[in-house]
Structures are given as C-alpha cells and as structure tokens.
Amino acid sequence: MKKILITLVLVAYAVSSFVFTKHFEKREMVNINFSDRNGIQVVELNKDERPEDKLRKIEELSKKEKINIYKLSYKPIKTSKKQKVIIYAAIGDETQFKQKYPLEWGKIFNQDHSVASYLSSRDTKDKEQVGKINIFSPELMVEIKPIEAAKDENLRGAYFVDSNNPNVVQKVKEKLNTEIGFKTEESERAGTMNILENQGVDKYFIIVLTIVLLLIFLSFLYYILLNYKSLAIRKLFGYTDRELIFKHLLKESIQIHTLSLMVVIIGQVIYLFFYNGMSKFLDFGSTWIVWQLIFSGISILVSLLPSLMIYHIKILELLKNKKPLKLVQFLNYSSKFIFSIFLIIFSFNLINYYQDLSVQNSNQEKWDTTKSYSFYEYQSNIIGDRTNWEYETGIKSKKLFGITNQKGALLIKPSDGITYKKQLEYNNSLNNTIGDVKEYDPHGGNTLQVNSNYLHDNPVYDLNGKKINIDADYGDYLVILVPNKYRSNEADILKMYKEWYQFTRFIDEDKHKESIGEKIEPHKQVEIKLTYIQDNQKHFLYNPMLEVKKQNYSKDAILIVVNSENMGGDSYLSYLTGRYFFPKVDNPSQPYKELKEDIKIAGLQDIILTTPSLYSIVDDYLFKLKSELQFTLLFVTLLLSIEIIITCFTVLNYLERNKFIHAVQRINGFDFYKRHSKICFLLGLFWLIIYLGALTFKLANYTIISLIIPAYWLVELLIVYFIIRFVEKKKNKDVLKGA
C-alpha cells in the first residue's frame, strides 16, 4: 500500500508542476501583451506631420521622461500556423526594458542601428536581428522593433506606458495630446486580437489543484483505514493518539512528500531541457521551487486530516479482529458516484474539443488561404448624430467595398439562422416553435450573402454541372443562387426575397431622410433573378465557430450574390464592421500598409483603426481550443486515476468483508462468476444508472454516450477481475490460517 501511496503523491506533484508551468507561461504572455494593465487609445491624430515625425517625437518623449512606450501588433507567419506578436518600442529606460524583456544574447537597438533592426525570440539568422529575447514558452513568437518602424502601421490604436504610476501614465497621455497631436482615451485591453482573452488558465489552475489535494486526502485516508490493525497495535503498545499522528504518520507523510519532490525536480529539469532548452531556467526554477514548497506544505497538512481517524481506533476492536469496513464501504460508494459523474461530463467535453480540433485540422488548407486576407476594425466612438454617422459611413463603406472587391476581396455573411443556430434551436425548443422558420428564409434560414470572388474561390455548379461565374459588378439587381430542391417553392421565395430586398436596399436612405426631416419618396421596385444550382453543395464559412459539426461548411444554402451597387449603405457598413468582408493582401505581415491607400480614397482613414489578418481569428480560436483540450485531458486523467483508486479499494474492501464466504465457496467448487456475480451485477447497475441519467439530461449525443459509458464499465470490470484474481488467493490462505 505504501508504494501505491508514493506513486499517487508523485502523480500529484507532477500534475502540480505541469499546471504551474502553464500558469507561468500565461503570466509571461500577459506581461508581453500588457493584458494586465490599461493602455492609451489613440482615436484621432492631426495630419500636419508625417507618421515618421510623430513616431520620432514619441521616441524623444520616452527618453525625456525616462520611460518605455510600446505599441502592439499581431502578424501571421506564412511558414507557420502560429501568430507573431510585434512590439514597437520607444526605449527611455534600458534597465526596465531588460527586466521586462531579458536578452539571451545581443544588445538593445539604438540610434546606431537602422530602423529595420529588431529583437526576436527566435534565431532568425537575419542580419537585422541584433539580439535574442529570452522567452520561456517555445510557442510564443515575439519581435521588438524601434517605434519608428511602425510608420507603415495605423498610428491609431493602443499604446502602453511601462509604468505602474498612474500619474506618469497621465502625464504621457497629456503630452501625446499636446506635443504629438494625438486625441486619446482610456483603453481597457491590448486590443481585439488579445490572444489571452477568456483563456481561463487561472480557473483551471484552481480546479486542478483542488482535485489533486482531494486525491491526496483520499489516498492517505485509505492508507490509514487499510493499516488499521498496525496502528491499533502501536496504540496497544503505549503510543498516544498525538504520538501516532505527529511522530509516526506525519513523519511518513514528510518522507513520502520529500521523495516525490526530489523525483519531480529531476523530471522537471529533463522536461525543460527538451521543452525549451532550459530557457529562463533560473527565473522559472526559483518561482517553481517556491511554489512546490508551498504545495508541499499544503499537501502535508491535507494528508494529516485523515489522521483524525486515529482518535476512533479502539483496542477492543483490534482484539476482536474488527476493521471499519462499513465506513470504508460508504466512502467508496459515495466518492465513486460523485467522481464518476464528473469523469463522464469531462470525457464528453474532451471528445467535443477533440472533434472540434480535428475539424479545424481537416480545414487547414482552407485556413492557410486566410493568411492572404484581412478585415477592418472600425473606430467605435461616434461623435454627433448616430443615424447621420451610419449613413455617411455606409456610403464610404460602399465605396471601399467596390475598390477592394475589384482586387479580390471576399464576402461571406451567414444569416442569423446560421450564426445564432444553437441559441435559436434552444429558444425554439422552449417555445415549441420548431419548424416555424423556413429553410430559405433570408433572415433565419440557411442563407449566405457572398460576392463573385467567393464564388471564384469556392466553386458553385449549375444544374448542367457548369461552374457559375458572375461579374464583380453585374448591375443594380440581385442574383440569388437557389438549390434545385427549393424549385417547388419558387413563388414563395420570390415574394419573400423581394420584400426583404426592398427593405434592405433603401432602409438607410429612408432613415437618413427621416432624421433630417425630409419627405420619404417611394422607391423603384427591386429586381431579383433566381438561378438554380445543384443540390448537396457545400460552402465554406471562413469562421471556425460556425457549423462545427459540418466542418465549418453550410450545405444546400441559398446564396445571395452581392456587388458594389445592389445593396444599401448600411449593408456595406455591416459587412465591413462585422468581419464578413475580407480585403485581399499580398504581404500579410504589413496589411495596413497595403490597404491604407484604398481606405484613404474611401474617406475612412479616420475611422478604420487597423486591418488584422483573418488568420489571426483562426489562430486565436485554435489557441483557446488547444488550451481547453489540454486541461480537459488533464481533468479526465486525474479523475480516471481517482476512479481507479476507488475501484481498487472497493474491491479490496469487498474481498475483506466476504473472505470467509468466498473461501467456503471456493472449497465447494464455485467458479469465479458464481462467487463474484454480485459485485459484477452491482457494477453493471451502477453504470446503467449513469448511462440512463446521461441520456435523460442529454449530456451528449446518443452515439458518444453509448461509446464512453460502456467503455468505462468494461475497463472497470477488467480492473475488478485482475484484482480479485491476484488478491483472492491470499485472502483464502488467511482464512485457512485463521487470520
């Protein structure tokens, strides 16, 4: 039993080490991304100076105030599935900079270096790299460049002052307004591309440690219960309860914890050697040791809690050869039921995350193409009348749509019926309105608004098997591609879409005229052209969060083909602000530099803040998904370990309680099944109850439930079988010897 206890404590230390390593990585990412502090949001700037001059002034300001000012950007990597963090730095305090970004080799760029010089977390073999940043996580790609290198970025956006003094930050903010010509406001986070958003590592950190400490508690409790006789004998020979707890059990607990800690230290060093080449070893190692010592103290205290059982050990029961088997049985069944439920729930979640990740991996070829596309981020603060702003910005957005549409931009806007599918299905199930919305409804049905470039990259075929080609600007009417399965509903489709199109086409003009007090004149009747296409065609949604079960495809959707003439201004505004429209770029590392001229021509240079890569959305989603998968796998592993431990002790307790009956049955020729059919039946009944409960509460779909729960039942039967085979003979011998 002691060997098993050492193994369990060792597992607890290993889990604690793993979780702390992930926590350390997260804190490093927070530090690099400034996610733990507010920034200064630049929303407007005067045009009396070139960007280079403004950035040079920021550099001078940082040196004058002896502080560091940073601007962040996120870039996709063409040769990788990862995202790179670009930090533009104005360095006024080199000591503080080196503390925040320690260098493995090289030196900080200065005035003697070119603007193209940079620091990187990787050895790039580039002559412009002047140093390597010492980063713990090998997954994190960081480059730090001089602030003047941001001349091709949008100067609007978030800036961060590396100071915890609010007075210093306020002073810099005022000087950015007065000396640089910026208009600023408070920023709550690093930006919409913050890859740490909702990661939840701290939440998992607490949950995992709680489970680990519970594992230690149960392990030591079983250890005491199964060593009941030896502890009672010590009590018989004069040991007091206090001496048993603090001289015997505490000593054993400290020895077990010390041995486990030594083994984990060696294992952690080996792990770091292969994981990150011992990068930031002293920084990580010092905090890791402190954490493990704290964990050891807490764990030892938790291991002492079961020692209270010592006060209930009766010497009289020892003389009668009695053990607290009923208490053990109660603990076994109650803890087994609770942990089994959690094990099943987390197992279902694990399968869902794995399936989701498999879907994204299968779409990797599609996702790789998104590195050549960006999306627009509009400034959200509106000055003046909102209706007028939306109308004017809609007209400008329509112009920008037309410019970039000619250059290969993609439009893909799913209907609300696709975007909010789960929520709508849930609401419908509550209100018993399933089937009220028709599949071809433009709002709640299976419809997509696309442009001709989308059809070029994602071919759609007509009834003759020919690829449909539509001009980018085919005119001021609407082409709708309808699967042949809806041909019988043609009249209803025409009526429904004409009403929808009539409203959508002119609503922005009507709202604008109403707001300025002009009379709303009747509009011309819109024109719609239906083209039938083959059934069972799939259309990629370019959004990893939509139609996951269908591999991010929509099947048999009605396609509404949009050009730069046939919609109202508010529609174009919704395309560009809602991340449905993706301008094409040749250089993914500098999308704003490539797109800013088109933005300026459309008159949106004061409204569009940045143009992040479309791939960054996918990268962010995959990052969170992998984090969820890793921690859920850890939960399942922990819970499964606890479940196996409980099963082992349940069987051992069962054999102890029934050893006389089993010995007699074995002597009289009862086979294995006849002797142990009761426990096999109880295990089957136990998992049947959980199976029916999972179906009743719809914890997962029928297939997953029918695979997972029987699998756990079979694994438990095998464990029970082998334990009985190995232990029963010894119990029979003990009975024959009179033990």
Image: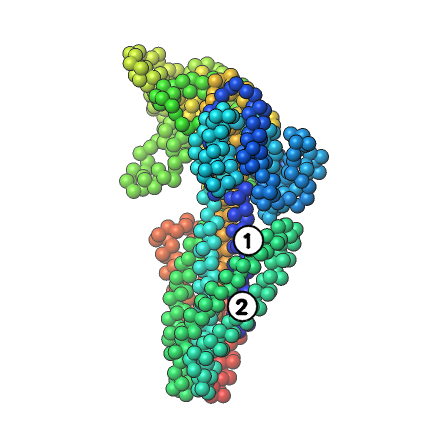
Residue at 44% from the left image edge and 51% from the top image edge: 203
Where residue 684 sits: x, y (%)? 41, 64
Residue furthest front as drawn: 64
Q: Secondary structure at mark 2?
A: helix
With respect to residue 469, does 324 lie above or below? below
Can residue 677 be seen here? The reply is no
Q: Secondary structure at mark 1?
A: helix
Which residue is denoted by mark 2 in the rendering? 257
Q: CA distance from mark 2 to mark 1?
A: 20 Å
Where residue 53 sits: x, y (%)? 57, 23
Residue at 53% from the left image edge and 62% from the top image edge: 293
**Which of the 4 quarters of the picture holds residue 661?**
bottom left
Where residue 364 sits: x, y (%)? 57, 38
Q: Residues within 10 Å of mark 1 (few under 14, many from 20)?
A: some
Front residue (pair 638, 87): 87
Which residue is denoted by mark 1 in the rendering? 21
